[in-house]
Image (spheres, rainbow, N blue to C red):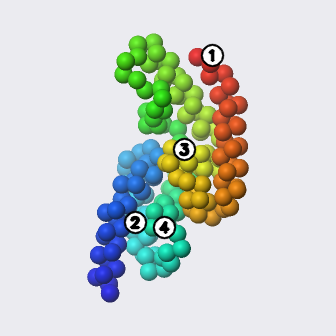
Amino acid sequence: MKVKVQNNFEEIIIKHQQKIYKFIFSFVKNENDTDEIAQQTFFNAFKGYKKFRGESSVDTWLIKIAINNIRTHFRKKKFFSIFKVLDNEEIEIKDLKDDSKSAEEVVKNKMISNKINKAIEDLPARQKEVFVMKHIDGLSISEIADILEIAEGSVKASIFKAINNLRKLLGGIDEL
């Protein structure tokens, strides 16, 4: 039985490793920390594999473990916010990237990107958390609700508030 569980778990790691790594990296923005958190996530998942009841998808279960490890990571580093989203070199604002633009446009786009990233960082913790999970990591409302153990309505409300706050924070973006 132990060999079967180990083989099944190896398949889970192979299937989900890249997605979990990208998910963690979208929050911590550091490869070494991402490696450490991903390793801890799969270690915790292996320890709790027998307890997994299958009430959610394996993806959702692993992401939930990853979120707990990300939170622990930031607590250990004595960050006051739950997640650090800002790293101007890493978050891609796809609409702002275009190789055919002039140097002036590239600089302007970089300034806009910086302002957007700063606005995301300034969101309250829960709003930032659900906004990043929805719009950067591409998770569905139901997946976010399962991971955070909150109602789908609460997720929708947090996303709505985050978008409204971003609109307020980015009100002067046309001035650039």
Camera-near label (4 vs 2) is: 4
**CA separation, marks 3 and 1?**
25 Å
**CA separation, marks 4 and 2?**
15 Å
Q: Earlier in the sequence, mark 3 or mark 4?
A: 4
**CA separation, marks 1 and 4?**
45 Å
Q: Is residue 48 left or right of residue 2?
A: right
The answer to whether residue 154 is above or below residue 99 is below
The answer to whether mark 4 and mark 2 are in CB contact below 8 A is no
Q: Is residue 121 left or right of residue 108?
A: right
What amino acid is at disc 2? Answer: Phe
Camera-near label (3 vs 1) is: 3
Single out the residue that lies furthest toward the bottom.
Answer: 1
The answer to whether residue 1 is above or below residue 127 is below
The answer to whether residue 60 is above or below residue 74 is below
Residue identified by numbered label 2? 42
What amino acid is at disc 1? Answer: Glu
What amino acid is at disc 4? Answer: Ser
Q: Earlier in the sequence, mark 3 or mark 1?
A: 3
Q: Earlier in the sequence, mark 1 or mark 2?
A: 2
Camera-near label (1 vs 2) is: 1
Residue identified by numbered label 1? 175
The answer to whether residue 45 is above or below residue 29 is below
Residue identified by numbered label 3? 135
- What residue is drawn where x is 40% and y is 54%? 19
**CA separation, marks 3 and 2?**
25 Å
Residue identified by numbered label 4? 57
The answer to whether mark 3 and mark 4 are in CB contact below 8 A is no
Residue 88 visible within the image: no
Q: Secondary structure at mark 4?
A: loop
Q: Secondary structure at mark 3?
A: helix
**CA separation, marks 1 and 2?**
46 Å
